[in-house]
Image (spheres, rainbow, N blue to C red):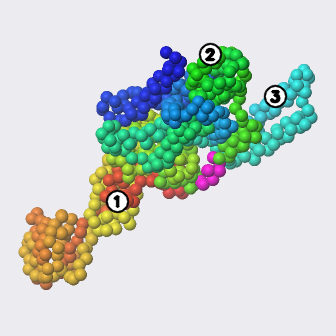
Amino acid sequence: MTIVTARRISQIFFLIVFLWFCVVTTLGDAWWQLRGWSVNWIIELDPLVGLGTLLTTHTIYSGLLWGLATVVLTIVLGRFFCGWICPFGAIHQFVGFVGRRKKTSLEKAKVNRYSRWQVVKYWILIFLLAVAVSDLLLYLIRLPRGEPRVFLGLIAAGLAVALILTVSGTYKFSRRFLFALLLGACFWAVAGFFLNDRQLLSASLQVGLLDPIPLVYRSVNLLILPLVDETTLRLTARPRYYEGSGLIAIIFLTAIFLNLKFPRFYCRFVCPLGALFAVISRYALWRIGKTEAECTDCHLCERNCEGACAPSSTIRINECVLCMNCRSECHHHLIGYRTSPSAAGETVSPDVSRRQFVVAAVSGVAAIPVLRLNGYLAANWNPQLVRPPGALDEEAFLTRCIKCGQCMRICPTNVIHLAGLEGGLEGLWTPVLNFRIGTSGCQHKCIACGNICPTAAIRPITLDERLGKNHFTSTGPIRIGTAFVDRGRCLPWAMDTPCIVCQENCPVSPKAIVTREVFSPVRFGKRLVVQRSDSRQIELEGNMLEPDRFATGDFFCKITGKVFSHPRRIVQNTDRRLAFSADRPWDMPPEPGSRVEIQIRLQRPYVKPEYCIGCGVCEHECPVRGRRAIRVTAENETRNQQHKMLLRT
């Protein structure tokens, strides 16, 4: 077996494992549904996710320690993850192979030449890490006032090192350098005092936007598998729908089909994870390279080079994805995989200039403070942004969510969806609840999303905590929001139409939705006058009624002008006769010439906020199509005490 064959087997294996993990991320009792599979394992192997959460939260979720194994193996072997494990990379490689299979060797070598635009992925990596490290920078800037001893210690240590190096003759510092050092310390001190009262720098985890692992999870979970659900190979009881999947499809398919023009386009030009591996692989012990500097310059080694790393000349180690195609293509056996450097020379560092680094880093540091000027994390928070149960408060949530879509896939009722711009650009593709789509609301006995989230942006909770039982009785159930009745659209309130769907479907006990009975008169063009009557029925003058219209049990008849006249339930009617329920006949039938009034009994809903948990079942079941007559917002959510529905004194 050749090493290229081994690499292909590895790619196929990990692609199948990845797809299997996506399929089994489904609640149910079938053998192929979730049964303790480590469905987040490939995400946990991604060191960029672990590094991002470490920078934003200063902690690391235990499962993400798998990323350390990937880093260690990269230092030993090189960028093996890109060429041997990454499922997104395997898809790119296959599509790229299909796109160039009819091209000549010269054409293949031409599209596999190194492009200066491959540096873009390093800009993206620097930007995303700068976004994540912002609050650490704020801590350092605040050192002069927050930790003055630490600040003075750092300054003293820097001056001591400069003095030692100068005295020992190791390095001679110019006066200009020392002046710049002193000026920088003064600026640092002033900035520390100036920025003390307001947090201008904020961290946010945005690596999931372009990191290939969350991207491919998101695309398969929310695009490919829902399409499968529409076929006979259905994976769920009912087809699943996801709001915002169109943008996911555009990005995913664009990334895939660009491989027909440029093999491994995403890996070469966009992938921030590949850029991170490129930086690490400069220290790799094993590497691809020439065994001899001279060769025939046939350039066959570049014919199928996946990383465009120029193996025929000075090889770019940081771009090599260990596809091993160059080693297989060289008929003179001049390319090997070994611990010694390439005989023709190596380039181990990315072509990122100092100016490019500074621009990307400063842009990343400034991005989140600029985006948060909309006030979405302050007084201008959007109550329409309802997060799943167990979600951290919004600022902490945005430092952990990688937008992988795992919570959306596992949700049994299909109510967790991709956020658009309701949470600002920073919250794009994060999970948000949409109660109009799916089979029901957020089931109050379900804790699946928190127990599958790979970064604990939705923290794992127990059923007792969700329901507020046992040890959590004092804190009560977890509230994700509160329902509000829109009286302008509610059938009993606005249209005099009986409806108690929301109250009937409210799952909590005691009910969070109660009704109050009112009787509303039915308007006719003329007055209803009694012609004759008895204890069970009334005959009216004229043919004014629609037969059987009032026989639904919601209509009552009352004698007008009598204070103590109680309405009688109508059980049958013709065009002029009304029949009443036998259990409550008229004690004194209305006299001929009396006027009667037909009333409709309405049960108007009211929400009791102290009981409502915001599950959204009422909103989902509301019969008013389009914009529901009862809707859930994030008011009174448990995750943010500032959103409590209390009057301030």
Residue 503: tell me if it is visible. Answer: yes
Which-is-in-front pick, marks 3 and 2? 2
Which residues are the magenta region? 368-375
**Which residue is pictured at 20% across the width and 68% down the height?**
555
Q: Closer to the observer: label 2 or label 1?
A: 2
Count the marks: 3
Instruction: Decide: few, some or many residues near mark 3? Use Cα within 10 Å; few <14, some 14-19, many ≥20.
Output: few
Q: What's the residue type where badge 2 is placed?
A: His
Q: Can residue 81 be seen from the camera position used here?
A: no
Residue at 35% x, 52% y is: 620
**Residue 607: percent from the left, percent from the top?**
37, 56
The residue labelled by disc 1 is 625
Left or right of 422: which side holds 591?
A: left
Question: Magenta stretch containing residue 374, yes or no?
Answer: yes
Magenta stretch: dominant SS? Answer: helix
Q: Which residue is mark 2?
A: 333
| Residue 23: quadrant of the picture | top left
